[in-house]
Image (cartoon, rainbow, N blue to C red):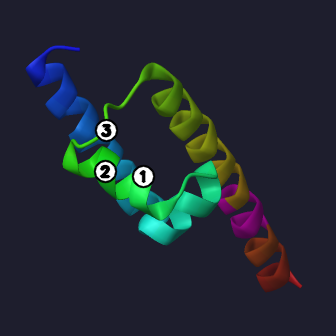
Amino acid sequence: MTGSTTQTSQDLFAHCVQVFGGIPATSRRLGIDERAIRRFINGEKPIGDGLLDDTAKALSLLVAEAKAAESQIAAAKAD
């Protein structure tokens, strides 16, 4: 990856960590050690396509879980 692409990947991954709810939550979702998550964010470890693919899949699962929770809340309010 080029320098700007690496920085973009770092920024994107850091944002995803925030969306997941922080480093511990990201660690659980991705099955990656918290120290590794920090190293990816800090640029100490390169962020490969596989990590980005896994992150995208985990985000899709999070969206599905959020939609299911939203539906349950709406159904409970309707009762």
Horizontal side of 37 relative to 70 (left or right) equals: left
Q: Quadrant of residue 10?
A: top left
Under mark 1, the amino acid is Ala
Q: Relative to 33, is 45 above or below?
A: above
Q: Secondary structure at mark 3?
A: loop
Q: According to the image, label 1 marks what residue?
A: 36
Q: According to the image, label 2 marks what residue?
A: 39
Q: Relative to 72, is 77 above or below?
A: below
Asked if the residues shown at circle 1 and circle 2 are in contact, with their CB atoms under 8 angstroms apart, the answer is yes
**Quarter of the image where the N terminus is located:** top left
Q: Which mark is residue 21?
A: none
Q: Quadrant of residue 66?
A: bottom right
Image x and y of residue 68, in percent: 77, 60
Under mark 3, the amino acid is Lys
Q: Residues within 10 Å of mark 3 (few under 14, many from 20)?
A: few
Residue 78 colored in magenta in the image: no
Image x and y of residue 67, in percent: 69, 57
Image x and y of residue 17, in percent: 40, 56
Under mark 2, the amino acid is Arg
- Extent of the magenta region: 66-71
Closer to the camera, 44 or 5?
44
Please report the residue visible at 20 percent of the width from the left and 27 percent of the height from the top. 6
Q: According to the image, label 3 marks what residue?
A: 45
Q: Give the spatial CA distance, label 1 vs label 2.
A: 5 Å
Asked if the residues shown at circle 3 and circle 2 are in contact, with their CB atoms under 8 angstroms apart, the answer is yes
